[in-house]
Amino acid sequence: MIEKSFAKINLGLNILNKRVDDYHNIDTIFLQLDFHDTIEFIPSKEFVITTKNAKISSGNNLVTKVYKFYKNNFNNPRGDFHITINKNIPIGGGLGGGSSNAACTLKSLNKLWELNLSKDELEKIAVNFGADVPFFIRGGAQRGTSIGESLDRLDLQFLRDKKVILIIPNFQISTQWAYSRVKKTLEVSDKDNNLQPLHSIKGLKLFENSFENVVLSAYPEIGKIKEKLLKSGAIYASLSGSGSTVYGIYDDEVASNVFDCNEFIYPSVQSFLKI
């Protein structure tokens, strides 16, 4: 069995305050892309994991952790699998590749082992592997609050199949570092920091990513990429998560065709919103 493991982008990301458990409360909109990894599950005498196109520790990655969780917590998983992850989503790029792989494995093994867990149950399990893993159980367009695991489905049909261009710098930005930098300027207040409702594509311009100011100061190249995307016709451009990927959303196919990948020294990927 081969399954697709989709990437995501963050439309706006407000960091509201630090919690007593050292996590941060956030408010963001997750949007699924059709850009994806693939994960293959083949029956095997023992559990084996292989990764193509990326170097990932076989013993300390989320797919292995999901596999062991099922084996240790359910009585009926019978048989093992050779799992092959074919990576396209860059590691550490803010596109949720590892989290998506974990969610894809949760769903796939639930089916293969006939565990009959509902999506609600899978979401509750998923948060054990990362705050944005629950999003990938259903995908689409969802608003994430609390640490990102509290989800509400959104009807954003006006964004369906809009073209997205991803610029993927050849450097990673540590999420831990980015949060530590935001923490220095974060002020908890009673004002409404929540994202505004989104009713049309014109409203995209109201959405901001709290990480951008701190990331741009340390990585000015991010700002240059964003500016180029907007000049090429993107209706909206932003850092995804804490980066380092920068994306542009295009309102129509004609505008996106103006994009010239030769303007960038970094790889680019053209995708569509899958919501």
Image (tube, grey):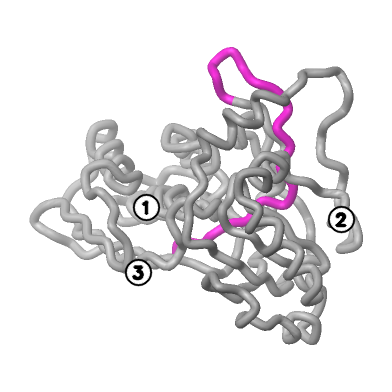
Task: State the separation of the CA atoms marked 1 and 2.
Answer: 35 Å
Tell which of 116 and 98 is nearer to you: 98
Magenta region includes residue 118: no
Instruction: Look at the numbered discs 3 and 2 and tell me whether their residues touch, using CB distance below 8 Å.
Output: no
Position above or below: 66 against 183 = below
What residue sits right under mark 2 in the picture?
A: 205
Q: In this figure, which residue is indicated by the disc labeled 3?
A: 2
| Left or right, 202 with reference to 181 | right
Q: Nearer the viewer, residue 1 or 188?
A: 188
Note whether residue 152 is visible: no
Q: Position of residue 64 (x, y in %)?
A: 27, 45
Assess disc 2: are there few (<14), some (14-19) or many (≥20) residues with their C-alpha within 10 Å of its C-alpha: few
Circle 1: element type: helix
Disc 2 element: helix
Main SS category, magenta section: strand
In magenta segment, residue 18: yes
Q: Which residues are magenta?
A: 4-23
| Type of amino acid at the residue the image marks with label 2 | Lys
Check if mark 1's residue and mark 2's residue have beta carbons within 8 Å. Answer: no
> Residue 232 appears at what percent x and percent y?
77, 76
Query: Label 1 belongs to which residue?
Result: 105
Three-letter residue code for mark 3: Ile
Residue 271, x across and y down, in percent: 61, 73
